Image (spheres, rainbow, N blue to C red):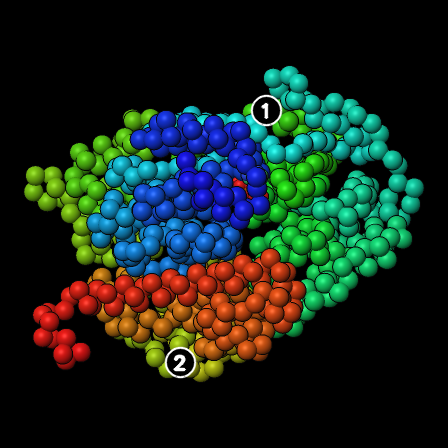
Amino acid sequence: MLGAAVEKILFKHKGIERLYEWQEECLKKHEEHSSRNLVYSVPTSGGKTLVAEILMLNEVLYAKRDCIFIVPFVSIVQEKVSSLSALALSLGFLVEEYAGSRGAYPPTKRRKKNSIYVCTIEKGSGLVNSLIEENRLKDEIGLVVIDELHLIGEPRRGALLENICVKLKKLQLKMVGMSATIGNLKDLAKFLDAELYTHDFRPGSLKEFVKIQNELFSVVHTSAEPEIEFLRCSRVESNKDIMAIDPDGLGALVREAVPKNSCLVFCQSKKNCENVAKLIVETIVLAGEEHIHRAHKESEKKSLLESIKLETNGSICPVLERTIRFGIAHHHSGLTSPERKLIEEAYSVGTINCICCTSTLAAGVNLPAQRVILRAPYVGSSFISKSMYKQMIGRAGRAGLAEKGESFLICKPIEAYLVRELIAKPVEVCDSQLKGEDLKTFILSCFFLKLISCRQSLDLTIETTFIHLCIGKESLSKMVSEALDDLFQLKVLYEGIKGAITMTNFGTAIAKANISCETGKYLFDELREAQKKLVLVGDLHLLYLITPHAIAESIRPVEEVVSSVYSSLTPKELYVASCLGLTEVVIARLMMGRSPPKQTPTRVLEKFFTCLVLYQLWKGNSLLTVANRFRVDRGVVHNLLAQTTSYASSVIRFCDSIESLWPFAKLLSVFPDRLSYCCSADLLPLMELPAVKLGRAKQLYRAGFKTVLSIAKADPHQLKNCILHLPLKQATQLINVAKLMVRTKFESLQEEAELYRLNQLDPEDEMFI
Ligand SMILES: Nc1ncnc2c1ncn2[C@@H]1O[C@H](COP(=O)(O)OP(=O)(O)OP(=O)(O)O)[C@@H](O)[C@H]1O
């Protein structure tokens, strides 16, 4: 499919020799049905990404069209941008990041080079909408690739993914979807009008075990339904102290693998991850193996701890500080993303050999292990689903990194029956999530983008949705009528003559802001209220307006914290609170442990409290100090910052679209950038690099690398030596990304200059330039 020279470069960059048979077969099938979309599925680690990359290269290099690559997490966007950068430099295309606060709507129009836009689902949706709005989608985009298409069955994000797919389908844009194995792949392919390709290829062998106390069972796949078969009794732990703290023998399973090999331990909850990491370390000490584990890559571990401290202003989590010395770490959403990134990097180069993580890592970045252990058959309080089980064990034994893999599922005798069922049952089906508020958002967005204009065209579009396939015409028609009635009632749409449906200004603002109608309504009321009494003594009131409410649910105020926070508010801050209805009387009531009076909505209270968390960060306090003060996970605080940044941009777009709200757009315009990094202005340019977080930015700055250009010019060894725990591979990637960013900027400026040149009025004008 690709020319020989391009193929050679691609293979060299990927470190591979040839395509797997299934990859060739899949590409061939796609070529034979090139007018159709493609959905393909192979088990985790089967090499799906390479097929998508070949298809995208084909578009950007030969068909000269841009591609959109949608992946599920910010961390994966950054991973893909980094890994594609070297290829882009060699082959002369651009890679643009659409995650967090990065990525412009609509994207810069380029005439010389083509781009691959790597996006999160949220940003991908914004990008697609902006291109449709500008009438550029069909002209510029040749292919949209969706990684983890099965996420269409996940609440919220799934609805957004479906929303994107339906629009692309309507505009007949080419789509390729990669999916994990799910029960209704055929339906998914039918929804996308796609060719379906499936294969059960795995690059290495995977031995699957179930451990119930000291009995080991192996999973056999000989019959139609896999089953578990007794294998042997595992060695009984002779050390009574270990037996007392670890009756399941988890520590022994980990110690068999590390430090020589790698191990991932999936745990039920965040707290559990930390406890399991501590437990493993205790069993290492009790087994008298402390020296082996501590001595392995000792200096690298020290510099890793230093790098983490730099990211967290010196206050490292005590559990990490202890366990990392043994090559063990925990990883979950309670950690900040810089901490997680450092742990992932350290694991990929073997400084850390065992990560105790939650299920989020199963679908996250490419972190394979020789051994995968599931601490219990639960994710949170729910029994594990078959698809999640498959994703987790699929991390064991990946091509090039750990060829042979083993997985162990630990369970109690009482759970044995359920585990047998889990092993035997097929993978679950995924259902459409395009309902409720999300259905309204979808309908509104279609009207806004002029994809539909009346009830009849709405009905035709609805027939092309995945939900139509899942629940059928009758139930859906009722849901659509109700959603439409709500939209009329909310005054975002109105019905004109001859059944034509039109957007109101309010509806346009909601669609432009890419928010739900419910959020739009609250936002509008809040801004109208603020117009009457906006407090501009300090930034607190403005910050309140851009605080997203949805996140507030995970920052529930604890009584003592509320009282200590409120009692430390300055008179100016108390004034802002009183303007929001949180008068001193209300606050005094709260501090006495009484519920707020009826006229003070809980919503305002929660949002103000969340806003105070942000305010502390805004004032320059460290994330860890703030998290401790408010007694929330620092990961939650980090997430709040990211969500506020994106919500702030939505609020600005909303205000820009409603004439009477223009002053807010101006006042709020500085917030997204400053919030997204929460750092001094000096470090801002460096923080634009996807792999650079605060600690690393500070080190780079101190070492004299103050701009992206200076990094682009650096030598990887030089960079590695002046940054703590920066593996050479990552240093090279960092330089490649920097080079690509400089090149992208250069191209943009050049194109802009050319545009000016082309638009000159007449040759005589040139004399005055
Ligand atoms: N033809 C090949 N030969 C050797 N290695 C390959 C080949 N194709 C892919 N790989 C390698 O296999 C590993 C896993 O590939 P990849 O991440 O694409 O799998 P995946 O199917 O997308 O996994 P997941 O379901 O977790 O996203 C990568 O390290 C990749 O470089």
The foreground one among 348 and 562 is 348
Q: CA distance from mark 2 to mark 1?
A: 59 Å
Total count of labels: 2
For mark 2, what is the residue?
538
Residue occupying image coordinates x 22% and y 61%? 657
Quadrant location, ligand no. 1: top right
User: Which quadrant, please, contains the C terminus?
Assistant: bottom left
User: Which quadrant, please, contains the N terminus?
Assistant: top left
Residue type at mark 2: give it: Gly
Q: Which class describes the residues within 10 Å of circle 2: few (<14), some (14-19), or many (20+)? A: few
For mark 1, what is the residue?
425
Spot occupied by residue 265 in the image (x, y as percentages of width and height): 69, 45
Q: Is mark 1 within 8 Å of ligand 1?
A: no
262 displayed left or right of 426: right
Query: Mark on residue 119?
Result: none
The foreground one among 329 and 555 is 329
503 displayed left or right of 415: left
Residue occupying image coordinates x 54% and y 58%? 733
Residue occupying image coordinates x 68% and y 50%? 355
Residue occupying image coordinates x 78% and y 30%? 216
